[in-house]
Amino acid sequence: MTYYNSTRRMVEEHSTTTLAFALLGLTLQKPSSGYDLRKFFSSTPTNTFSDSPGAIYPALRRLERRDLIRGQVEVGHGRRERRLFQVTPRGRAEFQRWLMRPISRDDVVHHLDALMLRFAFMDEAAGRAAARRFLKAFRKELASYIPSLREYLKSNRSAMPLSGRLALESGIRSYETLFRWTKTAIAAYQKEN
Amino acid sequence: MTYYNSTRRMVEEHSTTTLAFALLGLTLQKPSSGYDLRKFFSSTPTNTFSDSPGAIYPALRRLERRDLIRGQVEVGHGRRERRLFQVTPRGRAEFQRWLMRPISRDDVVHHLDALMLRFAFMDEAAGRAAARRFLKAFRKELASYIPSLREYLKSNRSAMPLSGRLALESGIRSYETLFRWTKTAIAAYQKEN
DNA sequence: TAGTCCATGTAAGATGTTACATGATTCA
DNA sequence: TGAATCATGTAACATCTTACATGGACTA
């Protein structure tokens, strides 16, 4: 809860959102139109993103304005013209910097979805070694966070209503499952070599 | 929902956000100031909410404008004056309607956090019977959703990069853990009786 | 010919983030 | 005296939601 920060922001370029990174990552895998990307979000278990045109098209514009993607109109054959986007070298660099960011406690507490998204793109866009390093860092951060949750539960257990306590236990279980998953995932990478 | 008030000006009543319901629920448990609520979000494992004043105070204003809570200034003794909020009968009714909403597939796919929040407040604000019904509906919805995820994985497994596939498997495991949790939670309610 | 899918977009409005601002009291 | 904590707020800005709007092509 610290809001008085002495460091001033110098750079005026705003930070890329998780949606923007998702668009960047998908477009990197395969040049895509806004419609393709909407379809991806609506037809796959990509739980966190909206497929609404009011979210996707403006986000693509912003990426294009920042020269992270570039769109070209496909003409001819059949249907209404579509704009096919490709990731620029700057876009690729920005995306890879995102993939390589260190994993913080805050990521684990508040941005698990972004973390899993990064991992999903990891081995195609940054290689298997990077994916393995990511998993190890993730596991480590979980290993340090989970005991603090258990501690909290232990201290407050008696003061909590049953449903509140169960809800917290659900959260702890979910982190524990994630922790076990990092271990099997690391093993999966080991086996592949 | 639109309605006309006594001055015949059209007033838009917009839907209550998850943050607003969280504030309502906490204030229902114990009359609270904006500061109390911020502290709660910053000091407990309530992962989904921000404790920033720019989010909390305007949200409280909106709730007050809609007559779902009412604030009164505490004067005297010591520190700077604080506004203590209490939930109005309308607020309580609105909150309980939220708790009792049916659980949809969409909730399970996109709003798990809101679902868990509802449950956390459930037995204090709606009673144990309601909590049990909620868990059973939740379990049922999970039971119908999980096979569709497994199906998706099965069909697309070979086309996915390793990290993408593992990310999806993590999501499936997480839903499975939740499913098992609903069963133990139901058992916990049974035992209490 | 009507409906559906492909395909792109905008406008209005609500909400949230970041940063700034203030003021009282307690404590080292 | 200065830092920390209690306590409430606003301003600027970015983003997202909801709804509307358009238009070509395919197919039942």
Image: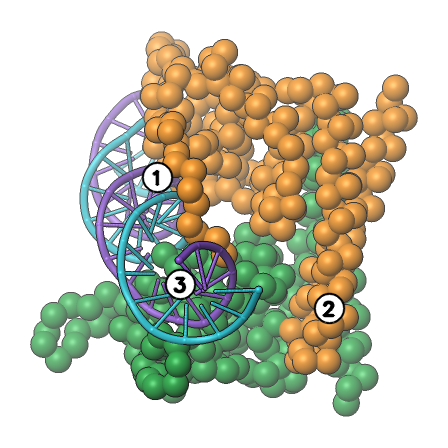
Chain colours: A orange, B green, C cyan, D purple
Residue depicted at 72% across the width and 31% down the height? A134
Judge the density around disc 3: few (<14), some (14-19), many (≥20) Cα neighbours within 10 Å.
some
Given residues B156 and D18, the one toward you in this image is: D18
Q: Earlier in the sequence, mark 2 or mark 1?
A: 1
Residues at discs 3 and 1 both on one chain: no
Q: Give the total of numbered labels.
A: 3
Q: Tag 3, which chain?
A: B
Give percent across and percent down for residue B118: 56, 70
Residue at the far bottom: name it. Answer: B193
Give percent across and percent down for residue A104: 64, 41
**Mark 2: amino acid:** Leu
Residue marked by disc 2 = A153
Quarter residue B57 falls in:
bottom left
Residue B104 visible, this angle: no
Residue marked by disc 1 = A54
Q: Are marks 2 and 3 in contact (CB under 8 Å)?
A: no
Nearer to us: label 3 or label 1: 3
For label 2, the SS is helix
**Mark 3: amino acid:** Ile
Q: Is residue A162 left or right of residue A49?
A: right
Quarter residue D6 falls in:
bottom left
Residue B56 — which label?
3
Residue depicted at 69% across the width and 45% down the height? B171
For label 3, the SS is helix
Give percent across and percent down for residue B15: 36, 64
Residues at discs 2 and 3 both on one chain: no
Nearer to us: label 2 or label 1: 2
**Mark 1: amino acid:** Gly
Question: Is residue B128 positioned above or below B183 on the image?
Answer: below
Give the CA separation, mark 3 to mark 1.
26 Å
Question: Is residue B80 positioned above or below A55 on the image?
Answer: below
Q: Tag 2, which chain?
A: A
